[in-house]
Image (tube, grey):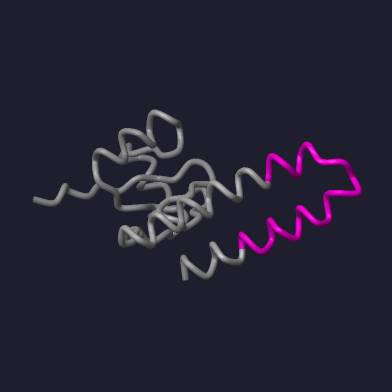
């Protein structure tokens, strides 16, 4: 039996199933996912928070789609590669940064292609 979905307000930039959601988006999510996202301070599931976004900001709720297992594995791999490149870029010497940034841009394009 599928879990019941509940609307939540996104509080921070949130990547979910390879898609980036900005603050004040409203997402319909399962309870187990909401719990972990609330614990990390990324969403607010109070009725007032959701009402603010839907009524005051005019935001329409979205239900994120889970990718299939193969695509999920590929998304996870790309996400790890991007995080490693971001860390490498921060620690790199100035003369090495353009090459690392080019790799990072390519990985971000690949991620975007997978999520469209």
Q: Nearer the viewer, residue 25 or 84?
A: 84
Q: Is residue 90 magenta?
A: yes
Q: Could you tell me if residue 63 is visible in this image?
A: no
Q: Quadrant location of residue 103?
A: bottom right
Q: Nearer the viewer, residue 112 or 85?
A: 85
Decide if residue 36 is in sight here. yes
Question: Vertical placement of 27 versus 83: above or below?
Answer: below
Question: Which quadrant of the figure has residue 17?
Answer: bottom left
Q: Position of residue 2 (x, y in %)?
A: 13, 51
> Which residue is drawn at the image coordinates 8% and 50% (left, top)?
1
| Image-quadrant location for residue 69 | bottom left
Farthest-out residue, top:
39
Magenta highlight: main SS? helix
- Horizontal and vertical percent position of residue 46: 32, 37
**Percent coordinates x, y for residue 42 in the rendering:** 45, 38
Q: Residue furthest right?
A: 95
The image shows residue 66 at horizontal and vertical percentages of: 32, 58
Magenta stretch, residue numbers: 86-108
Q: Is residue 88 left or right of residue 33?
A: right
Tell whether 50 sits left or right of 87: left
The residue shown at (40%, 54%) is: 73
């Amino acid at each position: 039996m599928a879990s019941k979905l509940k609307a939540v307000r996104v509080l921070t930039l949130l990547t979910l199933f390879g898609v980036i959601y900005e603050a004040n988006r409203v997402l319909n999510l399962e309870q187990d996912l909401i719990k972990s996202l609330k614990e990390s301070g990324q969403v607010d599931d109070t009725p007032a928070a959701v009402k603010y976004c839907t009524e005051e900001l005019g935001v329409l709720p979205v239900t994120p789609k889970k990718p299939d297992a193969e695509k999920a594995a590929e998304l996870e791999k790309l996400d790890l590669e991007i995080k490693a490149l971001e860390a490498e870029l921060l620690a790199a010497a100035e003369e090495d940064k353009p090459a690392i940034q080019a790799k990072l841009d390519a990985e971000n394009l690949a991620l975007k292609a997978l999520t469209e």
